[in-house]
Image: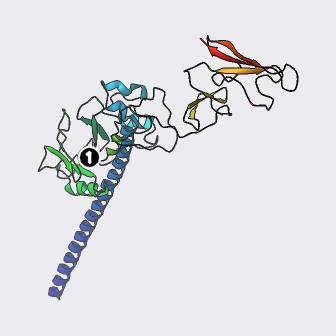
Amino acid sequence: MREQQGFALIELILAAIVTILLAVWGTQSLVNKINDASAQASAVWMLAVKKALHRYIERYADVLTTAGHAGVLSNKGYADWAAPRLVELKSDGLLSASFPERISPGGSASMRLMPSGSCPGASCRLEAIVYSDLPFISPSTTQVDEQMVAQWILGAQGWGGSVTRAQPHLLQGAAFAFPNPPLPGSTLPPGTVALAITAEQLGHLDFLRVADSRDPDFQGSATVKGNISTAGDLRTQRYLHLGAQEILQSPCAENNAVARDEAGALLVCNENVWRSSSRSGNGGYSINLVYGCQTRDKISTENPVTGSCTCPGQSRPVLISDSGPQTFPDGRTMGYLCVD
């Protein structure tokens, strides 16, 4: 009987040990899941910061590539254009006003723009990184939490990277590799996670865009379906081809517009009438004492240069013809030539 009681006690102890072990394993599994979820949430948070930084570079690219001093964007609320802060991006509308400025793990995020090429200048190229202010460290071992870093990179959808213990001199991921530190300053500790905006992601900035101040230096033909407006001069080293064809003395809607007539002569819209742009002569006109500046058949006899029965500028009319009866219905007609 006592032997059976001894076996029962041993079984009870073993069952208690198994129960405790299962509870510990379950607790540890739950902790790991919580840490994994936190790491992935931190990655999503930093992806939003990266997107805002990307828009920042797109919005101010022409200023950033030619920046001569840190405060070039001070009028937009940025103390240092190369190191924008979360609060500045929020004030500029690039991040939501409710966007949290801290996350766990990682603390907050710092941003650095890294110019390359001939800077400042039109050939300057920009890259940027967003990195955690705090490394991912396991509180129990005070070492890099490799599992949490791995979960963070998984949550970053392949765009993330980190500083590893094996290669502390690099900040690298699948799509980028920068020296550590990426710029002169304090070296980032192992466990620091980061996202990069590389030249490949900003390649579209090489193309002409709205409000661009750079010379696009097109090497081929360019076709534009709409209108082209310029506040400066329009220059061409070859020919200007006009497709618009109008009729001399016909109405026009937009003054100073230029077109051509059927013979190819240049016409200019002046006082809403298509007039000859020729200044090789001052033109001429005729006046009928009955019908005025037109014939009996209501055909205009005005000066094609001025669009009226007058001479342009300082020229004066010289009578070159005087014919017809003075009475109705023909009327006397006098022709004039404008001379200097």
Residue occupied by mark 1: 194
Q: Neighbour class for label 1 at 10 Å: few (<14), some, many (≥20)? A: many
Q: Position of residue 183 (x, y in %)?
A: 20, 35
Question: 9 and 1: which one is in front?
Answer: 9
Q: Is residue 340 above or below residue 246?
A: above
Q: Amino acid at mark 1?
A: Ala
Tell me what residue is drawn at x 67 percent, y 26 percent: 271
Left or right: 123, with 166 as reference point? right
Quadrant of the rendered structure where residue 131 is?
A: top left
Q: Position of residue 332 (x, y in %)?
A: 81, 20
Tell me what residue is drawn at x 67 percent, y 12 percent: 318
Q: Position of residue 278 (x, y in %)?
A: 56, 24
Question: 128 and 244: which one is in front?
Answer: 244
Q: Can you say which quadrant of the picture contains the C terminus?
A: top right
**Going by the picture, which residue comes out furthest to the right?**
328
Using the rendered image of the protein, determine whether residue 26 is visible from the camera's viewpoint.
yes
